[in-house]
Amino acid sequence: MKKQARNGVVLALVAAAALTAGCATPSKPDEMVATPATVVHRNSDSVSVAVSGGKETNPMWTSQISSDAFAEALRDSIQKSGLFGSVTDGGGSYKLNAFLGKVDQPLFGLSMTVKMEVSYTLVDTRSGKTVWQKDIASQYTAHPSDAFVAVKRLRLANEGAARANIQQAIAEMSTLSL
Amino acid sequence: MHRLIRATLLIPLLLLAACATQTASRAPDTDLSSLKTFYVARLPADHRGIQQLISARLQQLGYRSTWGDAQTSPSPVDAVITYQDRWMWDITMYMIRLDVQVRDGRTGAILAYGEVTRPSLQRKSPQGMVDQTLGELFK
C-alpha cells in the first residue's frame, strides 16, 4: 500500500512537471525569416515595413508573435530575397503593411498546429496607390520530436507558420511588375 | 500520503488558473463604424451554436446580421465574421477562449480581431464570452 502511495506521488509529480515545465517564450525573429526563393521580378526601389496586430508573450501563458518580431523577420526576409533594392525604417518608395489578423493556436496536444492569417498591403508611397493586397493563410505543425516541452513546441509552430506566411508573401510580391 | 498527492495535483491547477485576458486590434485605416451588415460563418467544428449567439449580439448592437454554414455570405454584406472557440473541462465544460475576426465582405481580408481568454475560475457562459469579445472589438 505504501509503495502504491509512493508511486502515486511520483506520478503526480511527473504530471505536474510535464504540465508546468518551462515558461512561454516569445517567437524569435531569426526563426521566422523565410528561406530565399527564386524572385521573378526584382525592384531597385526601397520599401518600408509596418506590422500591427501582434501580441506580446505572457511567460505564464502561451508563446505569441509580437508585431516587432514579425516586422524584423519580414524585413530580413525581404532583404535576403533581394526583392527590393533596400529595406528602410520609413519613407521608402513602397510601404508594406502587414496585419496579423489570426493566429489560431491549440491549448494542448502532442502535435501542435498553428494556423495563421496575415493581411498584406503594398502601397506606392509616391502615388498613394495600393499596388498589391492579399490575405495569406499558412500553418505549421510541430511534433514532440521537435520539442518535448509543450511551450517550446507551440513557439516552434508559431515560428513555422510565420516563416511559411512570409515566404508565400514574398513569392506573391515577386510576381508583381512594379 | 493522499494529502500529498492531492497537494501535488493542485500545482498545475493553480498555474492553469491564470488571469483573464482580452485583446482587440484593427488593420491600419480600418473604420468599423462604416460596417452595417454582417454575415456570421459557422465554424464547421462548432455544434454549440456560437454563430447564432454572435449574430444575435450584433443585432442587439444595432447591426443587420445573418448567419449560415457557408463560409461566404450568400448575399452581399459589409463584413463576414469568423470565429474559433476553445473549450476545456474542469468539473464541467467551459469556453476558455473565443477569437473573432471581422473580414471584408468583398475580399475576405481580416479587418480586425478580438480575443477573450477566461480560465476556469473566471469562466463565463458562451453568451458572456461573445458579449465580451464583441464589446472589445466594437468599442
Image: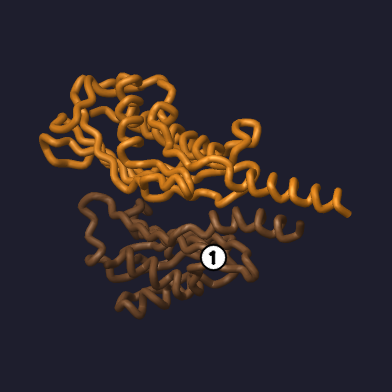
Instruction: Describe residue B118's horizontal placement relative to residue B11 as left or right.
Output: left
Instruction: Describe residue A104's horizontal placement relative to residue A5 as left or right.
Output: left
> Which amino acid, mark 1?
Ser
Instruction: Describe residue B100's horizontal placement relative to residue A52 as left or right.
Output: right
In the figure, B22 relative to A138: above or below?
A: below
What quarter of the picture does the C terminus of chain B occupy? bottom left
In the figure, A91 relative to A9: above or below?
A: above
In the figure, B40 relative to A62: above or below?
A: below
Q: Residue at x 54, y 37 (%)?
A: A152
Camera-side residue: A3 or A123? A3
Tell me which chain appears orange: A
Q: Is residue B71 visible?
A: no
Q: Is residue A134 visible?
A: yes
Q: Residue at x 52, y 60 (%)?
A: B17
Image coordinates for residue B110, horizontal then vertical, percent: 35, 53
Residue A83, picture quadrant: top left
Camera-side residue: A94 or B5? B5
Specify how the rendered protein is coloured. by chain
Image coordinates for residue B23, horizontal then vertical, percent: 35, 57
Chain B is which colour?
A: brown
Residue A45, picture quadrant: top left
What quarter of the picture does the N terminus of chain B occupy? bottom right
Question: To which residue does mark 1 refer?
Answer: B120
Camera-side residue: A6 or A39? A6
